[in-house]
Image: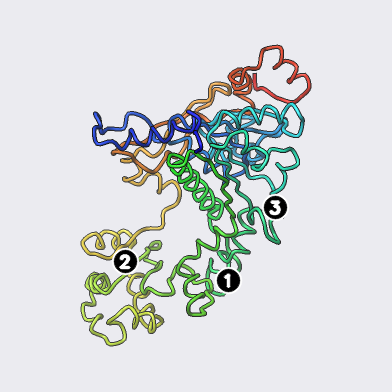
């Protein structure tokens, strides 16, 4: 019979305690991931976005960066907030502590192993096989910390014919089919306005880590997580993928319209554009009332969504003419009295000035003391018991916390000075 170490029993006991019927208080007294320690050896967007979400919910995230360079998004600009803080870096690295370590050296590897030994989660997005050269891969580490969740994100996964290739968002969105269905009809290739493949990969990574943490409460064991950005992109094709796999339909760019719902797209108005969504027959009846054509659903060409899809060219011709007769504001206002949806196409300023955005207090301001700069960030979108996690600190400057983290690991001041002299570590102070 295997005897579990006390440290392995602790998460299981926490689970039992939290599920007992004799709970004195049913209110959240702490953040959901408070007490979880994460070593974050990631860069750019997808994986840093995942670890930022973990930190928003209370996890202590230590970002490991390269000497002299750090995360290259620090230099992705202009615009810049300070010499080592770009707006791009700030978007996905709040709440973290930065330590600069040269993990290609023996002393640097010792530091990383010590961090791993004291952590719940290790996250990396290096090319598959990189960490194995330094014996920092899962197979070499798991024996020293069987509770560790070792999460890897890469372009194509840890194995397979493309596994050794590097990858970024736009090439993957092209290769994974997203760019092939995005943009105007018969137009040039168009990328999505933000790095959607990166973001969705980061969310898969984030949710997988949380699932593994829950699994550990039942088993006491960590595990290896392998997130492929390419496979993430394929999963993002959702209904378009289903249409191909089951019906052989190869989708093409449709502008703002929808292959299976009509009307569901942008229409030009007298002063701008309005996006109309009538997703079912009831909503289409309301739309017909709103445009002043209550007889439209009785037309045998348009009485059901299937018929509207089949006869979309004729229907959209009439609707295009009608929507152009009034302003966007007119259509948005009139839709508020019906079940279909009408929305303006906002620019970024208008989106953040939206009444719901203001009500939700989604924009937060944090202060970086090293560079003495205030930074605005988009807060966590999920509320727990009606409350924002509100756990925000400024994105760190490069090596801002190196000394404190090493001291926490038990390094003496003299040992730290030697590491600095050998350029194995770097500190902002």
Of tags 3 and 1, the one toward the viewer is 3
Q: Quadrant of residue 294?
A: bottom left
Disc with the residue nearer the chain's start (2 vs 3): 3
Residue beneath the point at 47% across and 47% down: 207
Identity of the residue furthest to the right in this view = 422
10 Å crowding of disc 3: few (<14), some (14-19), many (20+): few
Q: Is residue 330 above or below residue 300?
A: above
Which residue is disc 3 drawn over? 166
Of tags 2 and 1, the one toward the viewer is 1
Q: Is residue 172 above or below residue 54?
A: below
Separation of marks 3 and 1 at Cα, in angstroms: 29 Å
Which residue is disc 1 drawn over? 187
> Are dots 3 and 1 in contact, CB under 8 Å?
no
Residue beneath the point at 48% across and 44% down: 212
Residue 301 appears in the figure: yes
Q: At which x and y percent is residue 186?
A: 57, 75
Q: Quadrant of residue 148?
A: top right
Q: Quadrant of the C terminus?
A: top right
- At mark 1, the secondary structure is loop
Q: At which x and y percent is residue 420?
A: 73, 20
- At mark 3, the secondary structure is loop
Q: Which residue is nearer to you in this view: 203 or 368?
A: 203
Q: Which residue is nearer to you in this view: 256 or 397?
A: 397
Which residue is disc 2 drawn over? 326
């Amino acid at each position: 019979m295997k005897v579990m170490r006390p440290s392995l029993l602790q998460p299981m006991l926490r689970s039992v305690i939290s599920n007992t019927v004799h709970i004195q208080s049913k209110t959240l007294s702490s953040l959901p991931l408070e007490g979880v320690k994460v070593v974050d050896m990631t860069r750019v967007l997808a994986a840093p976005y995942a670890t930022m979400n973990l930190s928003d919910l209370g996890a202590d995230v230590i970002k490991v960066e390269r000497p002299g360079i750090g995360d290259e998004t620090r230099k992705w600009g202009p615009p810049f907030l300070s010499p080592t803080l770009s707006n791009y870096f700030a978007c996905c690295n709040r709440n973290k502590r930065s330590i600069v370590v040269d993990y290609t050296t023996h002393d640097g590897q010792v530091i990383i192993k010590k961090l791993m030994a004291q952590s719940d989660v290790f996250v990396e997005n290096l090319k598959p096989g990189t960490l194995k050269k330094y014996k920092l891969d899962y197979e070499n580490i798991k024996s020293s910390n069987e509770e560790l969740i070792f999460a890897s994100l890469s372009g194509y996964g840890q194995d397979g014919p493309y596994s050794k290739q590097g990858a970024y968002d736009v090439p993957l969105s092209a290769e994974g089919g997203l760019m092939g269905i995005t943009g105007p009809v018969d137009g040039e290739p168009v990328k999505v306005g933000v790095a959607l493949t990166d973001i969705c990969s980061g969310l898969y990574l984030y949710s997988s880590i949380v699932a593994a943490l829950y699994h550990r409460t039942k088993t006491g064991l960590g595990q290896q997580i392998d997130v492929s950005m390419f496979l993430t992109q394929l999963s993002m094709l959702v209904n378009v993928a289903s249409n191909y796999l089951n019906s052989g339909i190869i989708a093409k760019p449709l502008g703002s319209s929808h292959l299976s719902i009509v009307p569901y797209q942008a229409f030009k108005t007298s002063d701008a554009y309005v996006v109309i969504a009538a997703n079912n027959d009831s909503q289409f009846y309301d739309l017909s009332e709103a445009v002043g054509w209550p007889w439209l659903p009785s037309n045998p060409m348009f009485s059901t969504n299937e018929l509207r899809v089949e006869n979309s060219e004729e229907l959209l011709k009439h609707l295009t003419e009608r929507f152009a007769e009034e302003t966007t504001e007119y259509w948005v206002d009139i839709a508020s009295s019906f079940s279909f949806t009408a929305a303006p196409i906002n620019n970024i300023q208008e989106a953040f000035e939206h009444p719901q955005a203001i009500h939700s207090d989604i924009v937060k301001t944090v202060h970086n003391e090293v560079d003495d700069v205030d930074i605005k960030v988009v807060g966590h979108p999920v509320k727990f018991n009606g409350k924002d996690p509100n756990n925000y600190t400024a994105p760190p400057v490069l090596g801002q916390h190196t000394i404190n983290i090493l001291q926490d690991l038990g390094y003496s001041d003299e040992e730290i000075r030697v590491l600095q002299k050998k350029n194995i570590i770097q500190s902002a102070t």
